[in-house]
């Protein structure tokens, strides 16, 4: 990685880049400052069979205590965090870089009088991560509003995919095959003040359902495809508040896993297997218990590296 030393560091602790605040190191951590740097790095990794992953806000990633091999790429530099609009109209267009925080994208759209995505406010992450996971609520999914996506392929080339060329399913998409660069959305023209009120309402409701923001916390499971709430299922099998090591199911909302506040700063709290292993065991316990008691299979909302 010597030729990329201007934007690549070695042995970086990923706990500082994920919402849960725990996890091991990665061999190389890249923060490219341009698309050209990113493409060169992808070509290098492809030729040498070096694994490459992308991290956004780290809001749904679980990093093993032992760390991960290869390169983790963060698109947090200005080249990947721009927002531009195509002007107002019946179906206005707005383009956002993959590294733009989802909340910023939504508030910018609302301020322009562009509606459609305000119901996603309060969902953590970046635009790129939200598209990969087709983030949404019970009524809205971000994929519904996509017009086109520019992606960097792993061989270092760039493709532009139209909506018809992308598969969006429940909490997943076909965009994992490359690195999202920018996404263009076709939204709806609306009244700015009314959109702002709607956005604020969604924000208040969603935040009231989440544990305190100063905790190391992560949403653990997706609702089922039939619409059954993960939190309801967890409470139904009496696992709310259950703890394994330093990981616990939140008392506030049982679909969140919380790490004890001092666990990150006190190495003595870590058992030999580590905090991340506590989280994995807790996830498995919930899945097994729900399947046993209700015959329902519940899927993690986490990407376990």
Image (tube, grey):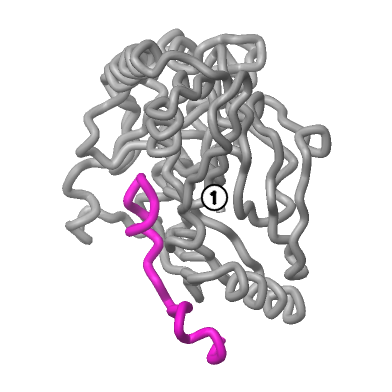
Name, please, the residue furthest toward the right: 165
**Residue 9 part of the magenta-drawn span:** yes
| Residue neighbourhood size for the residue with mark 1, other residues' Cα within 10 Å, grouped as few (<14), some (14–19), many (≥20) | many
Q: Secondary structure at mark 1?
A: loop
Q: Which residues are magenta?
A: 1-22
Image location of residue 258, percent across then percent down: 31, 35
Pointer 1 residue: 98
Q: From the viewer's side, name the closer residue of 8 and 24.
A: 8
**Residue 155 part of the magenta-drawn span:** no
Image location of residue 223, percent across then percent down: 55, 19
Name, please, the residue furthest toward the bottom: 2
The answer to whether residue 240 is visible is: no
Image location of residue 7, percent across then percent down: 46, 78
Image location of residue 158, percent across then percent down: 74, 61
The answer to whether residue 136 is visible is: yes
User: Residue sitting at 73 percent across and 65 percent down?
Assistant: 154
Left or right of 241: which side holds 115? right
Q: From the viewer's side, name the closer residue of 205 and 145.
A: 145
The answer to which image quadrant residue 268 occupies is: bottom left
* Image quarter hosting the N terminus: bottom right
Left or right of 177: which side holds 206? left
User: Residue sitting at 45 percent across and 8 percent down?
Assistant: 236
Left or right of 288: which side holds 23? left
Q: Is residue 75 above or below residue 238?
A: below
User: Residue sitting at 76 percent across and 66 percent down?
Assistant: 157
User: Residue sitting at 33 percent across and 59 percent down?
Assistant: 16
* Image quarter hosting the C terminus: bottom right
Q: From the viewer's side, name the closer residue of 46 and 6.
A: 6
Counting labels gives 1
């Amino acid at each position: 990685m010597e030729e990329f030393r201007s934007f690549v560091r070695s042995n970086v602790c990923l706990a500082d880049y994920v919402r849960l605040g725990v996890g091991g190191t990665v061999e190389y951590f890249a923060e490219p400052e341009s698309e050209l740097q990113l493409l060169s790095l992808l070509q290098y990794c492809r030729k040498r069979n070096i694994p490459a992953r992308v991290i956004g806000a780290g809001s749904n990633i679980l990093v093993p205590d032992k760390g991960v091999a290869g390169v983790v790429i963060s698109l947090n530099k200005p080249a990947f965090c721009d927002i531009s609009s195509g002007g107002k109209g019946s179906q206005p267009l707005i383009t956002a870089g993959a590294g733009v925080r989802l909340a910023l994208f939504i508030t910018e759209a609302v301020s322009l009088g562009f509606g459609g995505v305000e119901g996603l406010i309060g969902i953590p992450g970046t635009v790129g991560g939200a598209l990969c996971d087709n983030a949404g609520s019970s009524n809205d999914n971000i994929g519904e509003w996509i017009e086109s996506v520019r992606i960097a392929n792993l061989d270092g080339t760039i493709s532009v995919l139209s909506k018809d060329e992308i598969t969006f399913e429940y909490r997943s998409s076909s965009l994992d095959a490359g690195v999202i660069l920018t996404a263009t959305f076709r939204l709806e023209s609306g009244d700015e003040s009314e959109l702002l009120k709607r956005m604020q309402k969604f924000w208040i409701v969603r935040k009231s359902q989440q544990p305190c923001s100063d905790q190391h916390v992560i949403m653990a499971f997706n609702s089922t495809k039939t619409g059954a709430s993960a939190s309801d299922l967890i409470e139904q099998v009496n696992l709310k508040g259950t703890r394994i090591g330093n990981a616990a199911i939140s008392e506030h909302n049982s679909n969140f896993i919380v790490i004890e506040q001092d666990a990150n700063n006190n190495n003595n709290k870590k058992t030999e297997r580590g905090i991340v292993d506590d989280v994995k065991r807790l996830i498995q316990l919930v899945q097994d218990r729900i399947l046993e008691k209700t015959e329902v299979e519940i899927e993690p909302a986490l990407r376990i590296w």
